[in-house]
Amino acid sequence: MFSCTTDDQPQVGCLCHQPGIQNLSRRIGADLSRRGLVAGAAASLAALGISGVAQAQSAAPARPIVLTNFRLFDGRNAQLRQNQRLRVVGGRISGLAGGATGAPDGAEVIDCGGRVLMPGLIDAHWHTLFAGLSMQQLMGGDVGFIHLAAAAEAERTLMRGFTTVRDLGGPVFAFKQAVDQGLVVGPRIYPSGGMITTSGGHGDLRPLDEVPRQAGLAGPTERIGGNFLADSPEELRLRVREMLLQGASQIKLVGGGGVSSPRSPLDMSTFSVDELRVGIATAADWNTYVTVHAYAPETIQRALTAGAQCIEHAHLMDDAMARMMADKGVWLSTQPFLSDADSLPLTGPSRVALEQVIAGTDNAYRLAIKHRVKVAWGSDMLFSPVMAARQNIMLTHLTRWYSNAEILTMATATNAELLAMSGPRNPYPGKLGVIEDGAHADLLVVDGDPLTNIAILETPEKSLGLIMKGGKIFKNTLAPRA
Ligand SMILES: [Zn+2]
Ligand SMILES: [Zn+2]
């Protein structure tokens, strides 16, 4: 949702496209590619005879882990199951069974003390590189500091119970590698890379002295690795291919205006239907999907007509668009912005757009429910550790429209269904968001029952007794077995 402001409005609180941020992002990307930070680290490990993969694997416990004495929320079933035991081997769930039969020799046994075991949470709209860094830190920090701060936020994200995020904008490819190799503690990342927009669209925040755009010259949005401009089908195809070659699991196209782009109001649209078709077909060449950032009905209609498989935001959608989304089986990935408390302070046109979004939130959810649209949940928190810390509160905002069980399912099994749309581009093949045989062992043990009181998830530091990702325990405050 947030991404941009102009030069001429440096006071606007949004952020990702202010010139300072653009310069910073450019430095991050350039520095990473020049120095090959992650590649360098991997090379060092290789020199020691330890591959990156081996490093990641060595971090996972070699012996099986058996969890006992819990009530199970499996990601789908609203009824907690009692008297289960669960075995984790090699990062996967390898046995879920009733009864209290003994653990295999050598297994680590964890008594969950009757607490609730559930899948790790999934945020379908996150920005890993920018979520937890304040404007001041981004403006003033050097590259090393930026990455350390982003790493610290990634660890906090995991500690909030989020074991997976879908990243919808930012130079995240190298960071994802570092997480996957065990160099950084954080959630699994489904990367989009930079979002692709048009001249004048959401995300185009060039200084006006860079208009007209010069062919062949990278503008600030290209250099930051956050957004890329495309003004023809050929350019669009190129940008999509560039994201895919870097490992994008899905593509994000900007269909219209955005909250934080003062020159692109929410009612405007960017790509034509034919252009969107080119982007979608190019992603389809790689057997993955496109999600389109869209607020206004006209923008949503173009995306749906072109064959987009997912729509981001859609706070201004109307009844016809909700119906069309449902008829076509298209996902709605939206965020429950309820009040000013859910955003950094904004001014000018961005403030107006934010008010439009907040005013539209209730209608969007009601229409989605009325037409049975497939809804994914995301938080879209950006540019503030204070806002990032509200990630769990953005989840519990859903109690306005959904039962606790529906919310927990949305943030686990349902969001995982959306992630699976990446098909062969899925960086983590296998089941996520559910607790069943063969699924990735991404687990939370919750003190209290979130099905009856979901608010306990707003204080994960207290309520989460155990956090496991890929079979590795990242937090365990449960009492040792007597
Ligand atoms: Zn976003
Ligand atoms: Zn967006």
Image: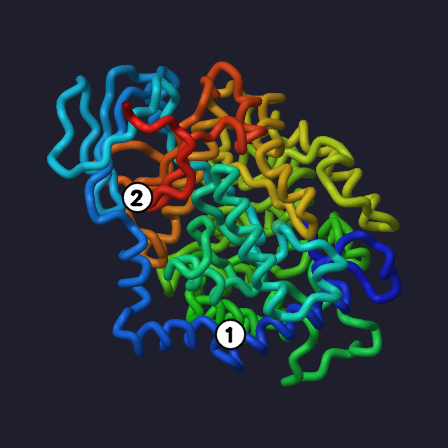
Q: Which of the two residues, 127 or 56, is positioned nearer the viewer here?
A: 56
Q: Residue at x 53, y 74 (%)?
A: 32
Any part of residue 231 in sight? no
Q: What scheme was used to colour the molecule?
A: rainbow
- Label 2 is placed on what type of residue? Gly
Instruction: Give the residue pinned by disc 1.
Output: 238
Q: Mark 2 sits on what residue?
A: 471
Q: Residue at x 74, y 65 (%)?
A: 139
Q: Which image quarter: residue 211? A: bottom right
Residue type (three-letter) at the residue carrying disc 1: Leu
Q: Which secondary structure, mark 1?
A: helix
**Residue 119, how many percent across, how many down?**
38, 33
* Whether label 2 touches label 1, CB < 8 Å: no
Q: Residue at x 51, y 49 (%)?
A: 155
The residue depicted at 26 percent of the width and 47 percent of the height is 61
**First in residue order: circle 2 vs circle 1:** 1
Distance between mark 2 and mark 1 Cα atoms:
38 Å
